[in-house]
Image (cartoon, helix red, strand yellow):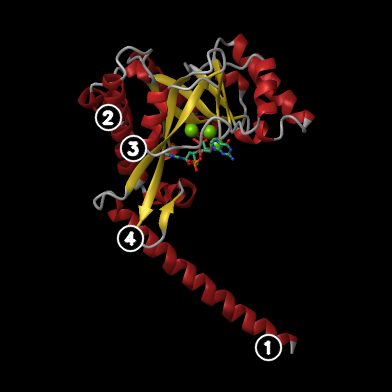
Amino acid sequence: SAKSDGKAQVALFHANMHKRAVAMLDLENDLRRALDRDEMLLHYQPIISLDSGKIVGVEALVRWHHTDRGVLSPLDFIPLAEETGLIVPIGEWVLRRACEQMAHWHREFPDRPPLQVNVNLSSRQFAKTDLVDSVTQVLAETALDPARLKLEITESALMENAQRSAHILEQFKRRDIQLSIDDFGIGYSSLAYLRTFPIDTIKIDKSFIIDMVTNRDNLEIVRTIAALAQNLNLDVIAEGVEAPDQLAQLRALGIEYAQGYLFSRPLDTAAITALLRQNPAW
Ligand code: C2E
Ligand code: MG
Ligand code: MG
Ligand code: MG
């Protein structure tokens, strides 16, 4: 009957909820041990200057090599890491690892214009009171020039407390650290606030880039962001560039930097090092 079907469904629903709760708890326990077990790793995706076609920097993107589940994407564990506060030690590990690696590349490629490394900060990290000190300390310990580090913070993280954000960004700027707004365009888009943040770069969210060529609205959004950035004297990076016609469109709009599968997927340290050595021009 319909009634017993309903009951069975409710029972199934509870069983599934229970299974999911247990799975989440397992994942949380595993995440607590991940750093000690040396299971976190970084991939790096090149950022390209559209003027020269050369790689000017890389974005560090964290991965978790889980013993049973294989390599997990940040989308599978960053939300949990945020919820549990584990993002703080994980984020610090990411920063240290990325800075060490970039300092290493600078020694390996001494004759080239120095590359920059972009590191993502979550809103939870951003809310920590000792963030500026801990970033400063990592830079000192890894001997990376602060001007070679660019912190990426999402628009929504900045807007959680805009006044406090402006204050923190100013402290970073005083230390000569570079700042980028990530995923720009999908958040509150508070253009008025943008002027009050001492940022260097806007990264246009990939959702606008991916169908820019076929979706007139998204093309107009990208055009508007590019014009805005120009007026505010900010660099623009388009993320999620997958196709040659998108690249042509970005060039036509005068956008200076791009990142996406068209150039390269995020690569492990060995593969990105090989790519940097080869130093291709796109
Ligand atoms: P994000 O910072 O916006 O990073 C860009 C994401 O877009 C990366 O996904 C990258 O692999 C992906 N991507 C790059 N080019 C293309 C493309 O052409 N097409 C498509 N479809 N995607 C492209 P990933 O590595 O899975 O990272 C997802 C998000 O996880 C990041 O988005 C960032 O918000 C977060 N994340 C990654 N690493 C860290 C970290 O160390 N700390 C924190 N707090 N968040 C991180
Ligand atoms: Mg990013
Ligand atoms: Mg982004
Ligand atoms: Mg994004």
Q: Earlier in the sequence, mark 4 or mark 2?
A: 4
Instruction: Kindly identify which residue carries mark 3.
Output: 94
Q: Which residue is mark 2?
A: 100
Query: Circles 1 and 4: CB distance less than 8 Å?
Result: no
Q: Secondary structure at mark 2?
A: helix
Label 2 – label 1 distance at C-alpha: 61 Å
Number of labels in the image equals 4
Q: CA distance from mark 2 to mark 3?
A: 10 Å
- Outermost front residue: 278
**What's the residue type where badge 4 is placed?**
Asn
10 Å crowding of disc 4: few (<14), some (14-19), many (20+): few
Q: Ligand 1 within 8 A of label 3's CB?
A: yes
Nearer to us: label 2 or label 1: 2
Picture layout, residue 23 above or below residue 204:
below
Q: Please name the residue that numbered disc 1 is placed on.
A: 4
Q: Which mark is residue 205?
A: none
Disc 4 Cβ-to-ligand 1 distance below 8 Å: no
Which residue is depicted at the point 64% across and 79% down?
A: 9
Residue 91, position as x, y percentages in the image: 35, 39
Q: At which x and y percent is residue 247?
A: 65, 24
